[in-house]
Image (cartoon, rainbow, N blue to C red):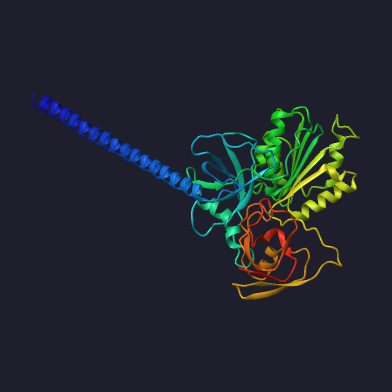
Amino acid sequence: MIFLWLVCGGLLLALSTSHFVATGWFSHAHSRSAYRGRMASQWQRRNQAQLARLEAQMNLCEKDQLLWKVLQVVEVDRESQDCCSFYLSDPNGQALASFLPGQYIMVRPALAGRFQATRCYSISSAPDPSFWRITVKRQDCSPTDPGPTAQRGLSGWLHDTIRPGDFLLASRPLGEFVLDENSQRARVMIAAGIGVTPLASMLRRSLETAEHIPLHLYFQARNPRCWPLGKTLHSWQAGHGHFHVTSCFSQTDEDELCQLRNRVTGRILGGYLSGSQICQEVRSVPGAEVNQQPDFYLCGPDAWMRKIRGELHNCGVDAGRLHWESFCAAAPMELPQPELFRPCSVRFDRSQLAVQWDDPQQTIWELARQSGVKIPGGCLTGVCGTCRTKVLSGEVEYVRAPRSPAKQGECFACVARPSSELVLDV
């Protein structure tokens, strides 16, 4: 009998203990769930308040041709060792404006602070009303680099700071380096590094709408770790018999190349791309017409593109079939006649510095940078207006017409050069 009472008492104690533990666990779980709910609700209210504030500020700002919008980052993907993709959508669920494959948007932080720079980033996705994707290469500041710290530091700020749910300011799509969708000629895309981003948009659009047109991608990269969008682009070859992808790595070994060949569709090479080799391969593709040259689209560093364009030209490719875009390069200069060129003095008034302008290929922005004077810069093509500078005296001329006219007494320094003695309020 005593043994029976002990067993019953033990069972009762175990049941009461388990009930106590279960009650405590469920209470704790409910408390944590309620906490997470409160935090999510608080985060949502904070985001809504921030969005309302940003949109109110935008409504107070001067309306210009860039038509800045507040966009929300909905996803961040690591594409390579030094590149991230940011997916942007309208926070109110509205459809985004359409764009032409190859165009870019201007991006800047939706806050006041150090990185109030404006940067151009190509849209690396095909047109889609639900999102725009930009793929950004990190370019950290160097204390020995005389370039504008805020401008170059923006990419690092995006990588380190921006997360899903954050906001950015973006312009409408801009740019004239776009896919000719009316052309029935073969399309050959040649990219180096982050220059692949506008071509990725063109490629995706071509695969969606032009299955009958031969399509080629040649992608130059340093190694498989610095290969933005590389695996994605190679995966697109599967199921598309008219699409051929080649990636060429300049800084890797044969073992790494062999491993990569076993993992991806398409062709993997070591070394450097050659315009003559590309031309020969494109012409040898079955069905290619010798008398109908493809359209070539190039994007990458200036020196690299000059080399590839020269090699293509030597192979007989017409200049009208070559289309290219240079990242972060100043506008091409239309040089004055030698007898008309006159060096002149430029004074940066607030910096108390006077310098001689004697290079007809140099813009005011480049002259200021060389002289250690900081004029903000963004697109360097006269689009964004970041470099707008007050002219105290003198005249300027433009090497490329700005997208919107400068106000009286101002100039766009990135596409302007002096046409007389000049004094600037900087």
Residue 211 versus residue 229 in the image, above or below? above
Quadrant of the rendering where the N terminus is positioned: top left
Q: Can residue 16 be seen in this view?
A: yes
- x then y, percent, for residue 123: 64, 42
Count of number-bearing discs: 0
Q: In this view, does 372 lie to the left or right of 292?
A: left
- x then y, percent, for residue 28: 27, 38
Q: In this view, does 3 lie to the left or right of 377?
A: left
Residue drawn at point x = 88 percent, y = 32 percent: 289
- x then y, percent, for residue 30: 29, 35
Residue drawn at point x = 83 percent, y = 46 percent: 275
Quadrant of the rendering where the C terminus is positioned: bottom right
Q: Can residue 237 be seen in this view?
A: no
Between residues 298 and 335, which one lies in front from this camera angle?
Answer: 335
Q: In this view, does 37 lie to the left or right of 351?
A: left
Between residues 285 and 313, which one lies in front from this camera angle?
Answer: 313
- x then y, percent, for residue 77: 56, 42
Residue drawn at point x = 74 percent, y = 27 percent: 211
Q: Residue furthest left?
A: 1
Q: Can you tell which quarter of the image residue 52 is in?
A: top left
Between residues 202 and 54, which one lies in front from this camera angle?
Answer: 54
Q: Which residue lies furthest to the front in this view?
A: 408
